[in-house]
Image (cartoon, rainbow, N blue to C red):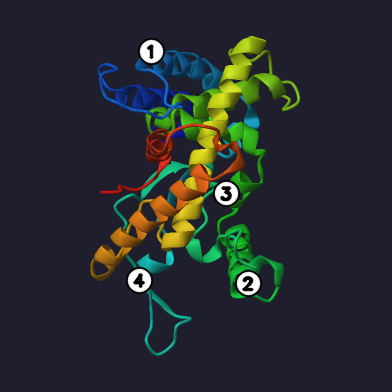
């Protein structure tokens, strides 16, 4: 299958090579996240991951959703300009710097903020007439009608896409995130009607238990990210307008210490010291505290 003058297998190799290129030269860089993993661990996972995604690339379903697609990956409300006279008329888009031509599946899980589900703290999703639900419904209908190749990618089993999405960003996400996807592929390879056997073999039961503990830390970190984004009303990259910078910085600090008090007073806190709790929370807090 041709993809930008190359082949889908070559693209898969490129994903793994990007993941390897992002690894530091050694393990001297301090990182206290329990789910991060060593450089050696990342390299080993990416090595076997290359075999996994190359095998998956032979599947016709993956080839169908690997059609080259130009897409704006940051299509959030702040990047869309509308007419002063008629806000239903879009006059322009900004922040094109991250746009590129990629396989359609690369964008299958992209949802602009104006069409994203409301947070768990909101009751908007319970009202079918709410703006959040209407925007999401209209967005889905537009994708289905106007971008059929992206619509097909959004309908494919998510398990088939995850190894491709996570392999090139293991150092950012932590080794456990990619390992979790490889374990899932190994477990459900046959259920997904993939040919042959999965190149990644399931770890031992003891290794699975260690992995599950590490994955729980990762899930906690992501929950903290979601809660802090909701409290601070900022996107995941922490972007804020310049005139709100000082206020958001102080709000971030207050949110951190509020969470810290909650953790310290939780029934599961045990007899750990305040400094130990703070060290744990700092290791997963998504934004700079100082």
Residue placed most toward the observer, 254 or 4 = 254
Where disc 2 sits, the SS reads helix
Distance from disc 4 to disc 2, alpha carbons, whole Å, reads 22 Å
Q: Residue at 48% of width from left, 40% of height from top?
A: 221
Label 4 CA crowd tier, 10 Å (few <14, some 14–19, many 20+) = few
Q: Nearer the viewer, mark 3 or mark 4?
A: 4
Task: Left or right? Give the position of 44 relative to 155.
Answer: left
**Above or below 127: residue 66:** above
Mark 3 sits on what residue? 149
Please give the label number shown on residue 134: 2
**Above or below 222: residue 50:** above
Find residue 242 and report its horizontal and vertical position in percent.
23, 66
Say whether residue 66 is visible. no
Find residue 136 and report its horizontal and vertical position in percent.
60, 65
Mark 1 sits on what residue? 40
Residue closest to the far right: 191
Distance from disc 1 to disc 4, alpha carbons, whole Å, reads 46 Å
Q: Residue at 61% of width from left, 58% of height from top?
A: 120
Q: Nearer the viewer, mark 1 or mark 4?
A: 1
Count of numbered labels shown in the rendering: 4
Label 3 CA crowd tier, 10 Å (few <14, some 14–19, many 20+) = many
Task: Left or right? Give the position of 232 relative to 211.
Answer: left
Say whether residue 254 is visible. yes
Task: Check whether the beta carbons of the residues at disc 2 and disc 1 lie within 8 A of each other.
Answer: no
Label 2 CA crowd tier, 10 Å (few <14, some 14–19, many 20+) = some
The disc, 3 or 2, on the residue closer to the chain's N-terminal end is 2
Residue placed most toward the observer, 21 or 218 = 218
The disc, 1 or 4, on the residue closer to the chain's N-terminal end is 1
Where disc 4 sits, the SS reads strand
Distance from disc 3 to disc 4, alpha carbons, whole Å, reads 24 Å
Mark 4 sits on what residue? 92
Find residue 284 and report its horizontal and vertical position in percent.
42, 39
């Amino acid at each position: 299958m041709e993809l930008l003058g190359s082949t889908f297998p070559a693209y898969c190799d490129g994903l793994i090579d990007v993941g390897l290129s992002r690894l530091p030269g050694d393990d001297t860089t301090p990182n206290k996240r329990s789910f991060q993993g060593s450089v050696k661990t990342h390299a080993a996972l990416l090595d076997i991951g290359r075999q996994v995604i190359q095998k998956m690339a032979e599947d016709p379903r993956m080839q169908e959703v690997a059609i080259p697609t130009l897409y704006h990956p940051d299509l959030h409300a702040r990047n869309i300009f509308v007419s002063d006279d008629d806000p239903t008329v879009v006059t322009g888009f900004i922040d094109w710097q991250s746009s590129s031509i990629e396989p359609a599946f690369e964008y299958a899980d992209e949802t602009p903020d104006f069409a994203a589900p409301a947070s768990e703290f909101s009751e908007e999703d319970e009202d079918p007439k709410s703006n959040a639900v209407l925007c999401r419904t209209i967005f889905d209908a537009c994708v289905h009608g106007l971008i059929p190749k992206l619509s097909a990618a959004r309908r494919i089993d998510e398990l088939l896409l995850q190894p491709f999405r996570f392999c090139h960003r293991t150092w950012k996400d932590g080794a456990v995130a990619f390992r979790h996807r490889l374990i899932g592929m190994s477990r459900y390879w046959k259920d997904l009607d993939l040919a042959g056997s999965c190149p990644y073999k399931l770890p031992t039961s003891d290794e699975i238990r260690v992995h599950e503990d590490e994955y729980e830390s990762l899930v906690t970190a992501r929950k903290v990210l979601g809660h802090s984004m909701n409290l601070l009303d900022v996107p995941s990259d922490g972007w804020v307008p310049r005139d709100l910078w000082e206020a958001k910085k102080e709000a971030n600090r207050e949110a951190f210490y509020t969470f810290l008090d909650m953790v310290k007073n939780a029934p599961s806190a045990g007899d750990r010291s305040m400094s130990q709790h703070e060290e744990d929370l700092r290791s997963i807090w998504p934004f700079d505290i100082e």
